[in-house]
Amino acid sequence: MSDKNNRLWTYSLPAALALLAPLNILASLGMDIYLPVVPAMPEVLATTPGTVQLTLSLYMVMLGAGQILFGPLSDRFGRRPVLVCGCIVFAAASLALAATSLAGLFVLLRLVQAAGGSAMLVAVFATIRDVYAQRPESAAIYSMMNGALAFVPAIGPVAGALVLMLGGWRAIFVVLAIPALLMLAVILPLWPETRRVGREGARAGFAAVLKSLAFWTYTLGFGAAMGSFFVFFSIAPRVLIERAGFSELGFSLAFASVAV
């Protein structure tokens, strides 16, 4: 990274975390906060449980697969444009989700919402790599960011259940849009571009990753663990709320215990 980019990012570690962590959390929160309302959505959208299931599956797939697209885009155009666009798309899709009751459009908007979340994640972690890769704070900031991601499944469903009780299912998506818009207002004046200028060999580097045995070992292991968790994640609302008779808040507390 150039000295110029080092000078642009002058935040202390607490200030940097205050900028980075909310965006990191928000992308994952878009999936977890929605869980308590999943059993009610087939009736709300006048559709089948299978269609509602797609709103979970497609979100998770896009959140991961979108990084394959937005990573190279952030290398070419910069972290800041990808981050700003991601915030705008995430907020706009969240507000549109709150306004629609059409099943097909709802599924499509969830896909768009996840694309915005994926762009935010890419920009955040690319910025961390740009700024902290050669600095002693790198281990601390990666640990804190990954810890925050692990904590979202514990707080997300509880927050969703409380919002559902107070404002209904549409309020859940409004609640997702508001912090995205607030962070956009913060990003525009405060988030400098950290991308290296004239990055050479980016394609070769990506090919090298795909050829790496270590990459596939960790990826397949993590993918198997996340796939197992997603099976539980996706069926738990219907089993615990519809069949076991849990309230939305009771389900959320039970789900949080698994995350903890």
Image (cartoon, rainbow, N blue to C red):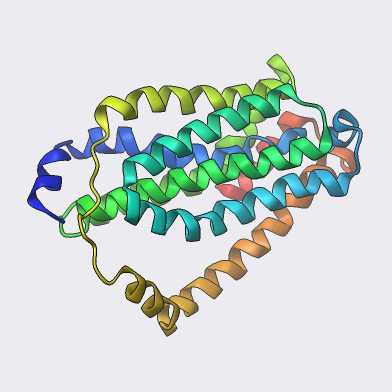
User: Quick one: 78 or 132, which is closer to the camera?
Assistant: 78
Q: Residue at image x 69%, y 15%?
A: 166
Q: Is residue 46 left or right of residue 183?
A: right
Q: Residue at image x 16%, y 56%?
A: 1
Q: Residue at image x 33%, y 40%?
A: 80
Where 134 sits versus 105, above or below? below
Q: Is residue 38 visible?
A: no
Q: Residue at image x 69%, y 29%?
A: 97
* Residue 95 placement (x, y as % from top left): 62, 24
Where 55 sits versus 18, above or below? below
User: Quick one: 247 or 108, which is closer to the camera?
Assistant: 108
Q: Is residue 152 left or right of residue 143?
A: right
Q: Is residue 158 left or right of residue 4?
A: right
Q: Is residue 75 left or right of residue 67?
A: left
* Residue 35 placement (x, y as % from top left): 71, 39
Label count reads: 0
* Residue 100 placement (x, y as % from top left): 76, 26
Among the 4 quarters of the image, the one containing residue 40 = top right
Where 225 sits versus 76, above or below? below
* Residue 200 placement (x, y as % from top left): 24, 68
* Outermost residue, top side: 166
Q: Is residue 222 visible?
A: yes
